[in-house]
Image (cartoon, rainbow, N blue to C red):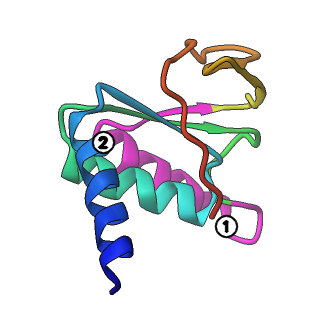
Amino acid sequence: MSCSSLLAANTWRERIASAKSIVLVGGGAVGTELAGEISDFAPGAKVSIVQRDTLVLNATYPDSFRRRVAKGLEERGVWIVTGDSITGLEQDVLDGKQGVVPGRKITTAKG
């Protein structure tokens, strides 16, 4: 790992550890994995997933598995908002159709 990569990783680690709340947009494989990891690493942070579909993951997986994944995340304290999507991101404010509370210091990442 290069020095710049290590510095970036440490910066993210510090940001996550000090966050009061973290909203992940998308409850696919990456979003659900990240939510679980963050909830373990920063147990004081409120971790939320906003998922457009009615269940996490996608329809490739059986609904029973999708429900089991959601239950496991919820047992770890992850708040899952389904049937919602992010409709805007302006001036560091996140807007959703329902249930998503506006936040500050929004950082976007794709995965």
* Amino acid at dot 1: Pro
Q: Where is residue 54 in the image (x, y as percent from the top left)?
A: 72, 40
Q: What residue type is labelled 2?
A: Arg
SS at badge 1: loop
Residue at image position (29%, 25%) is 20
Asked where in the image residue 6 lies, by quadrant, the reply is: bottom left
Residue 62's disc is: 1
- Give how far apart the Cα atoms at labels 1 and 2 are: 35 Å
- In the displayed structure image, the side of residue 9 where residue 98 appears, left or right: right
Region rendered in magenta: 58-81
Q: Is residue 95 left or right of residue 75?
A: right
Above or below 75: residue 4: below
Mark 2 element type = helix
103 is higher (above) or lower (below) than 55:
above
Q: Is residue 68 visible?
A: no
Residue 21 x/y as whole percent: 36, 27
Residue 111 visible, this orientation: yes
Q: Residues within 10 Å of mark 2 (few under 14, many from 20)?
A: few
Q: Which residue is drawn at 27% across and 32% down?
A: 45
Give the side of residue 50 with respect to residue 36, left or right. right
Disc 2 marks which residue? 15
Camera-side residue: 45 or 61? 45
Identify the residue at the far front of this view: 3
**Residue 1 versus residue 71: which sits nearer the camera?**
1
Quadrant (top left/top right/bottom left/bottom right) for the N terminus: bottom left
